[in-house]
Image (cartoon, helix red, strand yellow):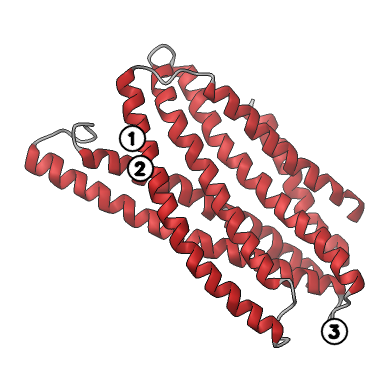
Amino acid sequence: MDNLFFFTPLCAVLALVFALVLTFKIFKEDEGSDRMKEIASAVREGANAYLKRQFGSVAVFFFIVFIILLILVKKGLLEPLVPYAFLTGGIFSGLSGFFGMKIATNSSARTANVCQTSLNKGLRLAFSSGAVMGFTVVGLGLLSLTGWYYLLDWYYTDHAPEGISKLAAITNTMLCVGMGASFMALFARVGGGIFTKAADVGADLVGKVEAGIPEDDPRNPATIADNVGDNVGDVAGMGADLFESYIGSIVATSVLGVAAGLGVNGFVVPAVLASIGILASMFGSF
């Protein structure tokens, strides 16, 4: 079974290429009228500003935790590559949410414009935009896990761990990839959710209650903030959350397989099954 592990990074790259193809397909569509482009541009600008501020704040916490982990490594309490695994998990989790938000903010106006002529085409365009984030999440997830496996396998060949097997040391380090992803997902999901709800309530109070403007009317500036919140919370936050859940489930299953005495086969099977799932999802997207 371990001979099939090479299949996993191939499927991960294939998922990212498929997401890129869907992205080009989406960008071929027109955004519509000047007014539609103006509103879409405002939402994109707000979402980018929020993520820039959020990632800047989260980077400070990641740096602090990274330094703490390095100190623990120096004291011999952790494996040497644990801090870097933690950092990698957070970066890939953030990238998953970022790419998902970029495609969402660029496809919304295009979907609305296409729906004016064909609801079926609009549905397929919206589905494709969602599929981009889905395939990006699984592609980055499997690529990071397989990359770390090959790196750790090479590292522990020359630096044998003390007191535990080589495979156990690999799984212990890879668990920290999931920890880093969870750390990023926490900030992205909770921070984005707070922003979303604050903008939603503010838009309702100012628009409907005070000014008598209908809900989701672009004349209300808070409506733009509400749409920004939907993107940063329900798309960027969701992307980071899904990445964390995806790699967390794979690594946890692999750890259980190794702990059960199944060796390399117990480690490899979850990743291979996830790779098969990517191929099935590609087939189903057509």
Residue that label 2 marks: 46
Q: Are marks 2 and 1 in contact (CB under 8 Å)?
A: yes
* Image vertical order of residue 162 relative to residue 20, above or below: below
Residue 242, percent from left and from top: 55, 52
What SS does tag 1 mark? helix
Foreground label between 3 and 2 = 2
Quarter location, residue 73:
bottom right
Residue 138, percent from left and from top: 65, 46
Looking at the image, can residue 69 be seen? yes
The disc at residue 163 is none
Task: Decide which of 271, 18 is in the foreground and name it.
Answer: 18
Quarter location, residue 1:
bottom right
- Tell me the distance, in whole angstroms, between the alpha carbons under discs 2 and 1: 6 Å
Residue that label 3 marks: 162
Residue that label 1 marks: 42
The C terminus - image quarter = top right
Residue 83, percent from left and from top: 66, 71
